[in-house]
Image (spheres, rainbow, N blue to C red):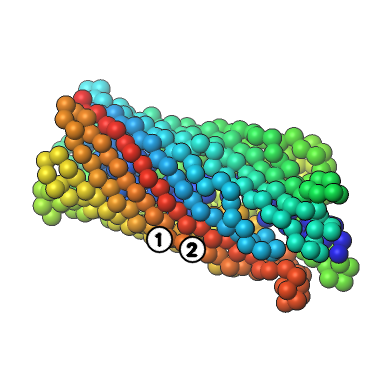
Amino acid sequence: MKKSRILGVTVAATLAMGISSSAFATNGYQLIGIGQYAMGMGGAVVAAPGDPMAALSNPAGLSWIAPQVAFSAEVFNPTRSTNFGFGNIGSHTNIYAVPSLGWVAPVGHNLVFGGGMYGTSGLGTNYIQSIPAPFNQVLGDSVLATSNIQLFQMSPAISWKVNNHMSLGAALNIGYESASFQEVFGGPQGQSGFNLASPTSAYGIGLTLGMIYKVNPMVTLGLSYKTPQIYTPLNWQATGQFVPTSYDASTGKVKGVSGNSGEYSAHLNYPQQVAFGMAIKPTKQWLVSVEGQWINWSATLGSFNIYGPWNGTNVVSLPTKWKNEWVFNIGTQYDLTNWLQVRAGYCYGTNPIGQGADTTANLLFPALTQNSITVGATQKLGKGWKLTEAYMHGFSNTNNGTPLLPGLEPYVQAGYVQNTSATLTENSFGLQLGYDF
């Protein structure tokens, strides 16, 4: 069995690591909600603003909350496993921090200024696998596949209360991301593989526009639109690379595109999306909020282009083929006492990848969770202080796919190679401290 054959089969999935590492939440690679109020409500807050983090979901909501500041600290625990074709393995990095901050204050003339920001501590994957015989005779004793991405977004926002029924808002979304990834085979034969391990950064910008309309004291409607957030390119200085496209059984070789040493680059943009919600207060103490979202993933991850000094071309396109996603959120809040509120929520999102679709390019995308439940509470501590907690559980979901490359089907039937698969389960817990001025 030739080295190029095995290397080509396994390295294909690694090309997705730079973007798979940011897949840290239910809705593709986006969080259900920012802050613990939004998380406790299952993300259904576009028509039910409850804290300054509204600047990140619907900036028009800032007009309907008291001047305040809030800080949230969340521990995110995704449990992931994948199968490159040589057995199921889990990621060795499963705990991440997600801090966020929000504020809102009046500026006069029915205007309020606020904003929100959040970041991640370095989401990614870290797969280490021993290579079984006879593959270890060709590749070595083990394979190391890692990825890392850091995300930060700040959204200064302004909201105008047009009248007692309507408010309009806008936020400027300023983003930063840093990414690196690699797949290296090691052993007595030395090391080989695909390596973009040097961290590189990019900056992005976009807008969020929103509206709140209070039909009456019982019913409120909310609408928000996020433009695409366009990032500068991620650039790596790297040695030669190889992207396999198929396995040729007649020659026993992997066909693909090779690259020379030089600069490689890619864009990881965020998609445009629309959210519409309705909040209903059956009683003064009880709030129910429902929301629907459309996320335009096909425009940003319909394919993933890697530019560089490839032989015969300047770009290689990975057929990620993400579909647009529909998301449904519902949340409820009840005031048990004048100092205690409790919440619960549910979020469902269609899988943007789909069963069996393009698993070679999407193998390390843990953007699979479709059903999530949340619970939360707020305690008013007195003198303007309040404490909010939330817990989220994303139920396990698995994508089962085809072999990594066309042409490997006979090896799957013979038991030498397995079909690809990826599994994700999520948990998170957060605490948020707020102060009303």
As drawn, 365 above or below 434: below
Q: x, y (%) of residue 227? A: 45, 42
Which is nearer the eye, 227 or 349?
A: 349
The quadrant in which the N terminus is found is bottom right
- Which type of secondary structure does the marked residue at label 2 adopt? strand
Q: Residue at x 61, y 33 (%)?
A: 201
Q: Amino acid at mark 1?
A: Asn
Which is nearer the eye, 71 or 254?
A: 71
What residue did someone put label 2 on? 397
What residue did someone put label 1 on? 371
Q: Earlier in the sequence, mark 2 or mark 1?
A: 1
On screen, residue 130 versus residue 42, left or right, reads right
Q: Residue at x 69, y 64 (%)?
A: 85
Outermost right residue: 251
Outermost bottom residue: 413
Q: In the rendered image, is residue 204 in sight?
A: no
Q: Amino acid at mark 2?
A: Asn
Is the Cβ of the residue at disc 2 closer than 8 Å to that at disc 1?
yes
The quadrant in which the C terminus is found is top left
On screen, residue 217 versus residue 270, left or right, reads left
Q: x, y (%) of residue 239? A: 80, 39
On screen, residue 163 versus residue 86, left or right, reads left
| CA distance separating discs 2 and 1 | 9 Å
Which is nearer the eye, 273 or 85?
A: 85
Q: Which labelled disc corresponds to residue 385?
A: none
Q: Residue at x 29, y 51 (%)?
A: 375
As drawn, 332 above or below 53: below
Q: Residue at x 68, y 54 (%)?
A: 129
